[in-house]
Image (tube, coloured by chain):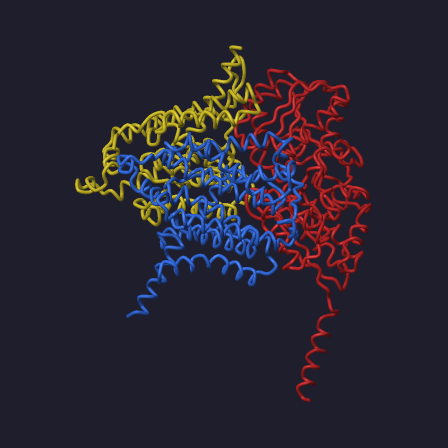
């Protein structure tokens, strides 16, 4: 019994960390910037393809490929922000939905044309393959990647947004763009940077989560609901909230798989429904009030 | 133009377009029937998105409920089509009513995700009830009786198209009437400024529940039409993906103006169909680029763009 | 007078340049040529058809076959019906082919039955599909067809207890039902049957809880692509192989996924109807032509189903000399047998479903590093065990 509970917690938390890693970038773009970004998965997918290419075609080490993948996703997002996304910040949410869905479609078609319609594995280095013995059971070694990266991203984002001038500027811009502009903040640049950071985090998540969510053209649509769920339950814009939400959702679904395998999915959505009915703003509201 | 002329003119549009479509595409009536049914569904979605101002990814829940209910009714109770439509309306309305009680206090992302959760739960339940619904193999074996006891459903879909088009027409007229009624005006007032209306004592919650239920009933009607004309109901009728697709059609056409829903459904389905025919592999690239263009250049959707173009022409003619 | 002469000359010229007035028979192929299933089905369909045509030319000298491809990404009965109707009424196709998903195939059955369009199913695998139209023929497989021999093999290998884990959808349920029935009939014990939602991404918990029950073997059915990849990796990384729980699979190691599964796949044993490593001159010729036309393509079960499906179409077209005679066409293919790249196959004269060998295969790595499904055992001439229920 004890080992069952331990197993549920271990698997649940490690799954939750994967969920957190793939959604954390969305907390920035959707939560903080208030941009309804349904194309989040596209940037995660871009990161995944980039990493696979770096490792397989160029033979770069995994860790380096991981960092470069995040950079590639960030740079592409930066370009898209300047070319398209910034034109719709002030527009209704539905226009943002339509634009980002359009981007998703294009991303799907392009990645299918470039990388083929089957999944592309990211080859793991020797030390991440196989399983690690935890004493009473084993766990896939790769799961330590989302664990480490998840905690690092959480700390990094907190430092960036709460402890740097950029963070102050971003919060000022989000809360009151006009006032921020009058204070001499280049709001356009701040937004572009934040969007790129969100996408880079997505790229990182795409690589870290690729063992569970394999990289393929339909990635952005297939897992969209998962990303949105984490952000909505956690409270848009709240990093720690997303973290807790991801662990909670991961653990509940995992418990469902152990205890009532057929109803794991229903359990996940029922939990989501209950949390959102109880707290419509998510578990944690955004810290800086508007 | 007087109001009467305007109303008559508006009422004539759907029949004229229907005849034109049959003349232009004489051998594709099953496809045209699909368009009519989809247009009806997008119309119902406009009530939620355009009139209540709520973005949903769960509208398929009501559509699927109507489809499965009508299919089961025809298989196990009576294969008469018109009563089947009523069953579809009731099923869609019921699902909408029950979920509205949970949903109508939420908005924004929360509302969106709750509609997703409800749809996914219904999807899973239907998937698991294989004995009743056929699961993902689909529910099949539906054989409808002749319409009014006289007109047989032919496999070319001729009757199917006219049947769906007439229902679409009637619902459109009804919704135009409702949109101009106090109920419809209140709906828009609630959307534009919830706070003020509630301070005036309008029961916002009850009003939104009523609107959502009406929308669900019409979605259920569309589902029933689909079940009766396709004769197979699949789980795709309940999917979040399909909900997203019809939302795209609506936003593309233009929200809050029933015309936008019709135009969006027609144009999206035509372009999808022909782009996929010309290039079965790469058509998604084209559709994606088109959506981006519409957002950038036609902020009020296709119908808004069309209207602006017509106005410009008129002014040009006047000067 | 002059004009008539000129026209006449032109007509003569036209006739003499075309060797014979070739008659065109149109075939509509409906499948996922874009979308999430295009890699596993749509592309293999097209490759199978085109490889067959490249190897065999036209059915006869004076009949030309034109294939019209229509994209249907996912299960969507309404669109399936509309596409079939339009192909028949507008494009004038004499035959239909393709269909990956059961509901789509069933929706088109109404058109096939009423318009009398002989149709070759390239995939849709529910047992009930072929009986939906008297003009349906299938060249793929059903899940009972491959699961029953797989269960027999598991018994022969001495496994007494199993847990089954299948994706929770039609084919998964079919596989589970028929495997359990055959395994229990042979004296085995099924400890638990797990149905995993199709949207599952993390299979670890299922595998951990299976491990706690300590069965001899784990029977698996998963659809192609991403879930298979995650599952196989999870099987290795959660230490089930070390715990001695054998992997009893079906389509998990098929060629389109095999190379991306990588080392995790080595040693996995599966029962299925086609291995690219099948040793026969027919398979060699097929693989050679496929590689010539599509250098990046993997010879996959879906490719062979479409290849054989095209053979069935050719047989029907030849038997009717390109004329629309649906009953004669179906009569010509019912009961037909031929040597396919997968081995000998027969279209059952009664059910119009396929009878074929099922092979037990094990994944091995060749010297060049590529993985292959090595056939180690054959269960000959297996019917669809589903229809007997």
Please tell me in which quadrant of the rendered image residue A66 appears.
Answer: top left
Q: Is residue A139 left or right of residue C323?
A: left
Q: Residue at x 71, y 73 (%)?
A: C17
Tell me if residue B176 comes above or below residue A218 in the rendering: below
Residue C9, position in %: x, y?
Answer: 70, 81
Q: Quadrant of residue B212?
A: top left
The blue-coloured chain is labelled: B
A272 or B180, nearer to the observer: B180
How many marks the image carries: the answer is 0
In this orientation, does residue A62 appear?
A: no
Quadrant of res C300: top right
Residue beneath the point at 50% across and 55% down: B271
Color used for chain C? red
Q: Is residue C10 left or right of residue B297?
A: right
Near-viewer residue (A153 or B133)? B133
* Extreme residue in the top direction: A2
Q: What colour do you see for chain A?
A: yellow
Which of the two residues, C152 or B246, is positioned nearer the viewer here?
Answer: B246
């Amino acid at each position: 019994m004890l080992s069952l509970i331990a197993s549920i917690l271990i698997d649940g938390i490690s799954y939750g960390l994967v969920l957190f890693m793939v959604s954390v970038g969305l907390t920035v773009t959707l939560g903080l910037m208030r941009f309804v970004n349904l194309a989040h998965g596209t940037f995660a997918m871009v990161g995944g393809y980039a990493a696979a290419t770096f490792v397989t075609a160029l033979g770069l080490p995994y860790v380096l490929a991981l960092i470069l993948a995040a950079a590639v996703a960030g740079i592409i997002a930066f370009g898209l922000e300047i070319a398209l996304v910034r034109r719709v910040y002030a527009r209704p949410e539905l226009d943002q939905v339509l634009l980002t869905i359009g981007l998703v479609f294009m991303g799907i078609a392009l990645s299918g044309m470039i990388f083929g319609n089957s999944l592309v594995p990211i080859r793991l280095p020797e030390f991440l393959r196989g399983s690690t013995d935890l004493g009473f059971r084993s766990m896939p070694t790769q799961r330590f990647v989302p664990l480490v990266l998840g905690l690092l991203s959480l700390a990094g984002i907190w430092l960036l947004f709460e402890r740097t001038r950029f963070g102050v500027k971003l919060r000022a811009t989000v809360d009151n763009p006009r006032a921020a502009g009058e204070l001499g903040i280049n709001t356009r640049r701040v937004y572009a940077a934040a969007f790129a950071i969100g996408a880079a985090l997505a790229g990182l998540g795409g690589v870290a989560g690729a063992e569970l969510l394999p990289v393929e053209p339909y990635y952005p649509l297939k897992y969209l609901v998962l990303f949105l769920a984490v952000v909505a339950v956690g409270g848009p814009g709240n990093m720690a909230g997303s973290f807790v939400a991801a662990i909670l959702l991961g653990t509940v679904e995992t418990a469902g798989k152990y205890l009532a395998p057929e109803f794991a999915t229903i359990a996940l959505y029922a939990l989501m429904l209950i949390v959102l009915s109880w707290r419509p703003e998510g578990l944690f509201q955004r810290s800086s009030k508007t | 133009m007087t109001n009467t002329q305007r109303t008559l003119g508006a009422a004539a549009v759907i029949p004229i377009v229907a005849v034109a479509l049959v003349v232009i595409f004489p051998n594709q009536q099953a496809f045209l029937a699909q368009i009519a049914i989809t247009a009806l569904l997008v119309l119902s979605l406009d009530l939620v998105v355009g009139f209540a101002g709520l973005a949903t990814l769960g509208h398929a829940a009501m559509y699927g409920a109507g489809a499965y209910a009508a299919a089961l009714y025809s298989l196990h109770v009576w294969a008469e089509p018109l009563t089947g439509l009523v069953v579809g309306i009731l099923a869609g309305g019921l699902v909408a009513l029950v979920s509205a009680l949970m949903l109508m206090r939420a908005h924004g992302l929360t509302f969106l995700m709750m509609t997703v959760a409800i749809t996914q739960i219904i999807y899973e339940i239907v998937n698991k009830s294989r004995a009743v619904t056929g699961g993902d193999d689909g529910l099949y074996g539906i054989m409808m009786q002749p319409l009014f006891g006289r007109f047989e459903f032919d496999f070319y879909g001729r009757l199917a198209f006219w049947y769906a088009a007439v229902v679409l027409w009637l619902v459109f007229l009804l919704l135009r009437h409702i949109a101009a009624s106090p109920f419809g005006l209140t709906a828009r007032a609630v959307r534009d400024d919830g706070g003020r209306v509630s301070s005036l004592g309008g029961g916002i919650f009850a009003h939104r529940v009523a609107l959502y239920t009406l929308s669900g009933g019409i979605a259920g009607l569309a589902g029933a039409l689909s079940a009766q004309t396709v004769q197979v109901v699949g789980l795709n009728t309940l999917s979040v993906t399909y909900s997203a697709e019809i939302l795209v059609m609506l936003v593309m056409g233009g929200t809050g103006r029933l015309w936008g829903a019709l135009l969006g459904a027609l144009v999206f389905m035509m372009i999808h169909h022909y782009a996929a025919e010309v290039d079965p592999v790469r058509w998604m690239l084209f559709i994606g680029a088109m959506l981006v263009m519409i957002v950038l250049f036609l902020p009020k959707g296709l119908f808004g763009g069309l209207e602006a173009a017509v106005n410009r022409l008129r002014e040009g003619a006047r000067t | 007078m002059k004009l008539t002469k000129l026209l006449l000359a032109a007509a003569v010229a036209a006739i003499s340049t075309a060797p014979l007035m070739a008659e065109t028979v149109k075939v509509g192929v409906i499948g996922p040529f874009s979308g999430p299933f295009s890699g596993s089905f749509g592309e293999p369909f097209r490759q199978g058809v085109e490889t067959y045509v490249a190897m065999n030319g036209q059915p006869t000298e004076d009949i030309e076959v034109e294939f019209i491809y229509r994209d249907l990404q996912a299960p969507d009965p309404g669109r399936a019906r509309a596409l079939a109707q339009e192909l028949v009424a507008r494009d004038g196709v004499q035959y239909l082919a393709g269909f990956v998903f059961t509901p789509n195939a069933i929706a088109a059955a109404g058109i096939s039955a009423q318009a009398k369009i002989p149709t070759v199913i390239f995939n849709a695998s529910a047992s009930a599909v072929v009986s939906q139209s008297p003009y349906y023929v299938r060249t793929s497989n059903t899940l009972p067809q491959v699961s029953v021999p797989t269960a027999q093999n598991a018994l022969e290998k001495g496994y007494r207890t199993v847990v089954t884990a299948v994706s929770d959808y039609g084919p998964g349920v079919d596989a589970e039902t028929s495997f359990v029935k055959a395994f229990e009939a042979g004296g085995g014990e099924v400890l638990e049957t797990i149905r995993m939602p199709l949207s599952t991404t993390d299979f670890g918990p299922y595998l951990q809880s299976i491990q706690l029950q300590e069965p001899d073997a784990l029977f698996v059915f998963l659809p192609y692509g991403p879930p298979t990849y995650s599952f196989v990796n999870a099987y290795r990384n959660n230490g089930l192989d070390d715990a001695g729980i054998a992997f009893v699979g079906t389509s998990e190691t098929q060629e389109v996924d095999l190379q991306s599964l990588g080392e995790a796949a080595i040693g996995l044993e599966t029962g299925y109807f086609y291995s690219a490593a099948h040793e026969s001159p027919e398979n060699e010729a097929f693989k050679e032509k496929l590689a010539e036309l599509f250098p990046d393509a993997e010879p996959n079960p879906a490719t062979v189903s479409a290849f054989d499906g095209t053979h069935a179409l050719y047989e029907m077209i030849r038997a009717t000399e390109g004329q629309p005679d649906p009953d004669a066409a179906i009569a010509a293919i019912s009961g037909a047998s031929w040597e396919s790249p997968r081995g000998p196959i027969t279209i059952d004269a009664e059910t119009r479903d396929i009878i074929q060998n099922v092979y037990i295969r094990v994944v091995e790595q060749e010297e060049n590093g590529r993985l292959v499904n090595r056939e180690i055992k054959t269960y000959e001439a297996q019917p669809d065990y589903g229809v007997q229920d």
